[in-house]
Amino acid sequence: MSSSIVHAVIMYAIAAVIAFFVALLIKGMSASLGRFGRKSGL
Amino acid sequence: MDPHIFVKLFQGIATLGASEPAVMVARISLILLGMLLIYLGKKEILEPLLMVPMGFGMAAVNAGVLFLAGSQQGTLFVDPMQSDPGPLLTVLQVDFLQPIYTLTFSNGLIACLVFMGIGVLLDVGYVLERPFESMFLALCAELGTVATYPIAIAVGLSNNDAASIAMVGGADGPMVLYTSLMLSKDIFVPITVVAYLYLGLTYGGYPYLIKLLVPKELRAIPVEQKRTTNITAGQKLAFAIVACSLLCLLFPVAAPLFLSLFVGVAVREAGLKHFVDLIGGPILYGSTFFLGLMLGVLCEANTILNPRVLLLLVLGIVSLLLSGIGGIIGGYVMFFLKRGKYNPVIGIGGVSCVPTTAKVAQKSVTEVAPSVLILPQALGANISGVITTAILAGIYVTLVPLLR
């Protein structure tokens, strides 16, 4: 039981890290693509 | 006249009499439950697109039992347990829904087709506008998906089965179907049935959870609407391809799901109108119809009488309930972080039942404050919920088989 709680917490932490990076990716892409779009007139 | 002729003529009734009392009661109850689901679907208390075909399938499969060779009982609908190539070929030619089950259901294709349809309906712009807030709420709303895993192990399920039933907390039907197919092939039928039954309930049950956990005055808090940043279709398309590639790279086992979701998004944002019409219309609704029908015919009395089903029913509702509570806790965290200028109800949108939970959130707010709009924020959390559920499905499918 206790090991399964540890496993669940670790998997949740991995999911949180990946979700954070996806959010970061979205934020970064929105900014850089926005700039690219404005410069290139797309 | 030979009395056996009646047995041969009315086999549905004869098999009822010939079954064990528990099976007989279960068959009659499931026929009635099927009818009830159709009624609740028609009244829109439960999701009609799923419940009407599912109710029909459930009623028909439990009524249409007949004697097969060797005095065994069975139906001419589907045999989910058949996997040996020889007998399977025979069943494929006899049971009328077997081709759909074998070629689209048991390999996860139908889940991916539904996911493609969901992708076409998603406007990722809501996430792109407020990515951190949306992802945070979505992660909080995965509480059930994570917390149910150790609970299920504590009550005696294996790691794989525990992960499969815990996925119900993600409130994403195709994802539960896919995960249980990958991890728990022998009980994926009851898990999927439980998941879809409960997903129908989110529409009716979550409003009560919101009323219980969020006082009226907090439900009426207006949310500051940011000036909508101009997010172009090109940005959304670029996000779809980069996110898809990244997630496939991280979790190749769940790559079919990621591809299905993001190709739907890409088709929408690339403006491929004919594909959008095809995927968002015939493919999505055709898949949903056959998914509902298939789930109904899989609700045979013998399957439902499996003692583990009761346990799965309890764990499924625990998971979904915890996710709802987790979402609202996330909403409260945002409420405190934004010093009271945030409506905590938005948090329930993080439960990824697209777009049901977002609509439920808006409806609960509209009841107390008709002018307050939270739908954009709730949809952002909702779409992020699909992504976080896919991430957790990828983690479970990849890591859980390695755990001891």
Image (tube, coloured by chain):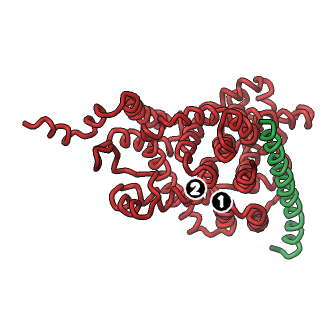
Q: Is residue B34 above or below residue B85?
A: above
Kindly identify which residue carries mark 1: B257
| Disc nearer the start of the sequence (2/1) | 2
Q: What residue is shown at x 84% (from left), y 71% (from top)? A: A37
Query: Residue type at mark 2?
Result: Ala
Q: Which chain is red?
A: B
| Residues at circles 2 and 1 in contact by the CB criterion of under 8 Å | yes
Parent chain of label 2: B
Whether labels 2 and 1 share one chain: yes
What residue is shown at x 91% (from left), y 37% (from top)? B338
At mark 1, the secondary structure is helix
Residues packed near mark 2 inside 10 Å, few (<14), some (14 to 19) or many (20 plus): many
Which residue is at a point 75% across and 37% down the rendered structure image?
B147
Vertical comparison of B192 with B216: above or below: below
> Can I make out residue B355 in this image?
no
Rendering colour (chain A): green
View extreme (bottom): residue: A40
Q: Nearer the viewer, residue B146 or B140?
A: B146
Q: Amino acid at mark 1?
A: Leu
Residue B111: mark: 2
User: Residue A8: x and y, percent?
Assistant: 79, 43
Of helix, strand and loop, which one carries label 2? helix
Decide if residue B297 is on the left or right side of residue B390: left
Residue visible at 85% across and 62% down in the picture: A30
- Chain to which the residue tagged by mark 1 belongs: B
